[in-house]
Image: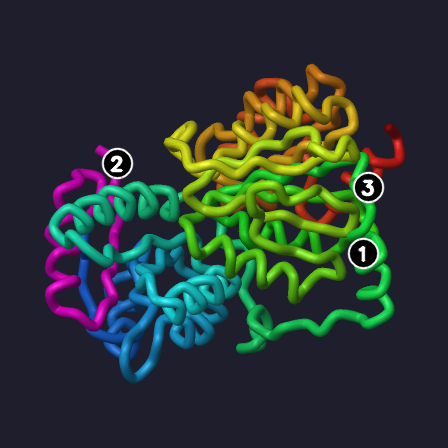
Amino acid sequence: MKDRIRVLIVDDSALVRDVLSVGLSRDPEIEVVGTAADPFEAGEKIPELKPDVMTLDVEMPRMNGLEFLRRLMPQYPLPVVMVSALTEKGKQLTMDALSLGAVDFVAKPKADLARGMEVLLSELTMKIKIAANAKLLRFKSRPDADTTVVEKNPKKLGDTAAALTEPSSRVIIIGASTGGTEAVREVVTRFPARSPGIIVVQHMPGGFTRLFANRLDSETTMKAKEAEDGDQILAGRILVAPGGKQLRIRKDPSGRGYSVSVTDEAPINGHAPSVDATMLSAASTVGRDAIGVILTGMGADGADGLKAMRDAGARGLAQDENTSVVFGMPAEAFKRGGAERLVPIGEMAKAIMGCLAKK
């Protein structure tokens, strides 16, 4: 029998520590080796217990999870799954934690705690198993490296304002899951202001996608926003598919370019938003004028959609194994023929621009 995944639980609530400990221990592949009430206790236990994965509460007294990550990751890299409160502060801290190296997160239930905790435990169990095999690629020595808002160049802002009046004849669709927030950021921050319209489908719950879009908007010369039903795909604009919904591309009713349909639907491939839903719509609507990109993530969402795009004449790329936190989605996209080649994340923006030039 293979070794079980050693897990350390860090949460200031004794009740939550107990519920997580008992619930996670039900899985034969997981061993809860310890719990800690705060980061100070966790810091003492990590060298002794040598956990494979740590679950970390976002909001705690004395030191929150974000500050603990700032100090921990450069010195003791460890796969971390955040346990996030659904408050605005909790969501923002979670987004910051992902930028500091956390692999993924789960959200604490707001109501119906008995059923909600079972859902949380199921999701947390799955994400612990993913985190145990994830690659920890990025650690920052500067405490504020990933959370500092970058001011946009005023000249480039003018370029973006001009671009946002132009319907985009080309459309770039980027799909990602585990590790994807930083991978997407790595790509889109390298695009010039007047790039073709971009659709980002990142597996993430409602509320978090709005914060993710706001972060992209603060760090790229393009204009980013969470997509709303009817939004037009414009040059210089990034639309982020909203969590809990499905986004599809359609011909714009004006007859000029494309817009998006955002609907409340059941998950597809277990996800809402689903990369496949968006890419399949791009295949039938945009055809050869689209470029599809699959970045890091577990599973196969997007693999069939990207293959359909390629069959319709579009270009397709996927992130390579060495730079993926989890290679599942890119590997499947390449295996099924949707991705022409595998590209390191640092070269992906250049590769996409090369596809645009070689239409």
Image quarter where the N terminus lies is top left
Which disc, if any, is residue 214?
none
Q: Residue furthest bottom?
A: 62
Q: Nearer the viewer, residue 166 or 101?
A: 166
Earlier sequence position, callout 3 versus callout 1: 1
Decide which of 308, 234 is in the foreground and name it.
Answer: 234
Circle 2 — which element?
loop
Going by the numbered disc 2, the residue's amino acid type is Lys
Q: Earlier in the sequence, mark 1 or mark 2?
A: 2
User: Magenta part of the protein: which range?
Assistant: 1-30
| Cα gap from disc 3 to disc 2, whole angstroms | 44 Å
Residue 193: mark = 1
Q: Mark 2 sits on what residue?
A: 2
Say how many tags the image has: 3
Q: From this viewpoint, which residue is outermost toward the top?
A: 311
Question: Where is residue 15, by image quadrant?
Answer: bottom left
Of residue 146 and residue 27, the one placed in the foreground of this image is 146
Residue hosting label 3: 353
Q: Residue at x 63, y 40 (%)?
A: 174
Q: Amino acid at mark 1?
A: Ala
Q: Hey, which quadrant is residue 353 in on the image? A: top right
